Image: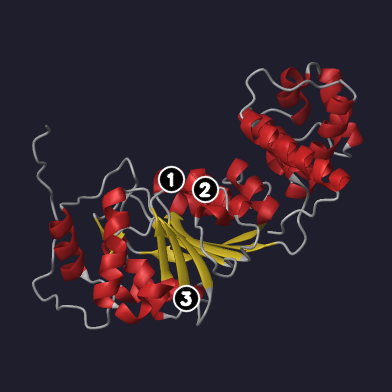
Amino acid sequence: MTSPRRYSTPNVPSDAQPSKSGLLGPIEVHAICQALGVRPTKTLGQNFVHDAGTVRRIVRDAGIGEGTQVIEVGPGLGSLTLGLLEAGAQVRAIEIDPVLARALPVTVAQRMPEAAERLHVINRDAVQINGLEDFEDDWPVPTHLVANLPYNVAVLLLLSMLESFPSLESALVMVQAEVADRLAAQPGSRTYGVPSVKAAWYGTATRAGTIGRSVFWPVPNVDSALVELRRSKTPRGDTSLRLATFEVCDTAFSQRRKTLRAALKNWAGSAELAQELCDRADVDSSIRGEKLGIDDYVRLGSVLLEMRAEGKIPLPEQDRYAKERRAAEDSEHTTQESEHSGVEQPRA
């Protein structure tokens, strides 16, 4: 049996007053943490917001109103959750910490009882969420992602949510300022990289302002910022094309100071095959990958699929996308079998 841990709690200003709005202030954050025996952990990237003004700003900037269907990742103590509910949203919240996941509905019931039925919390790792089936509810499909994302896995979580929930029209997430710059960067800029390209697959990302350190507990050692992503109305392609596009992108940026031909040659099998890939995609092989936009990478991904079908470029021995490829192949196989048998496929 482990000995009980000693937990620190946020410094509460001497002039702080209890919140009358239902949202959480420093006093409420202090009280909930003490009651639950909780302290934020770096492992889970937990920093709790305790400023109602910041919460309302995020909710307003996200365009949340009556009946908006929201997914929130990492709700923590419920600061942002309460703000979303206050605006009239229905919130599906994904919380990895079992203590916080159990406590959140209680907090909402106590502070905003009229909104309790508009909250659905599941205790899961958001990266493992596959879609609406994990929630087992009959609510309308979610259209907005609003979250204070754990900074150590922010990009992974954002991309995972956009992929798992194609109904999401927009995302407004709080991340480390440096990550925000990367997500919103344009080709040729110093901060442009893999996150920029992968976010652009789904839509247009823009930096939506900064957040002061003082609104968090514990106070982070990094600056924070908001990033808004508006999903493209027309999907760029299916899962196979996405994985091929991401694979080329990963390879090009793994040696970002090299030309595209040089960066891709070992992965493709030879400099000649790398050149053929670029030529067929109408991409200049003498420039660096950091100069290419999402459309260039999509063309490279499309040609990669063609050359794989022709037996020219094999799958890598260490395939980081192997699991997703298998899932996509299984899904396609199931769809084909159903079409042949005359069974109608369920619609998302």
Q: Say if 57 sits above or below 214 in the image.
A: below
Residue displayed at 65% across by 29% down: 322
Q: Which residue in the structure is indicated by mark 2?
A: 129
Residue displayed at 67% across by 17% down: 317
Q: Nearer the viewer, residue 200 or 106?
A: 106
**Category of crowding for the residue at label 3, using alpha-carbon neighbours closer than 10 angstroms: few (below 14), some (14–19), many (at least 20):** many
Secondary structure found at label 3: loop
Q: Amino acid at mark 3?
A: Ala
Q: Report, in whole angstroms, how far the alpha carbon at label 2 lies from the one at label 3.
A: 21 Å
Callouts 1 and 2 close, C-beta under 8 Å: yes
Q: Report, in whole angstroms, how far the alpha carbon at label 1 lies from the one at label 3.
A: 23 Å
Residue displayed at 20% across by 64% down: 29
**Category of crowding for the residue at label 2, using alpha-carbon neighbours closer than 10 angstroms: few (below 14), some (14–19), many (at least 20):** some
Q: Which residue in the structure is indicated by mark 3?
A: 89
Q: How far across and down, in percent of the image, does residue 201 sit?
A: 69, 50
Dot label at residue 125: 1
- Residue 327, by quadrant, is top right
Q: Earlier in the sequence, mark 1 or mark 3?
A: 3
Give the side of residue 155 with respect to residue 230, left or right: left
- Residue 325, by quadrant, is top right
Q: Amino acid at mark 1?
A: Asp
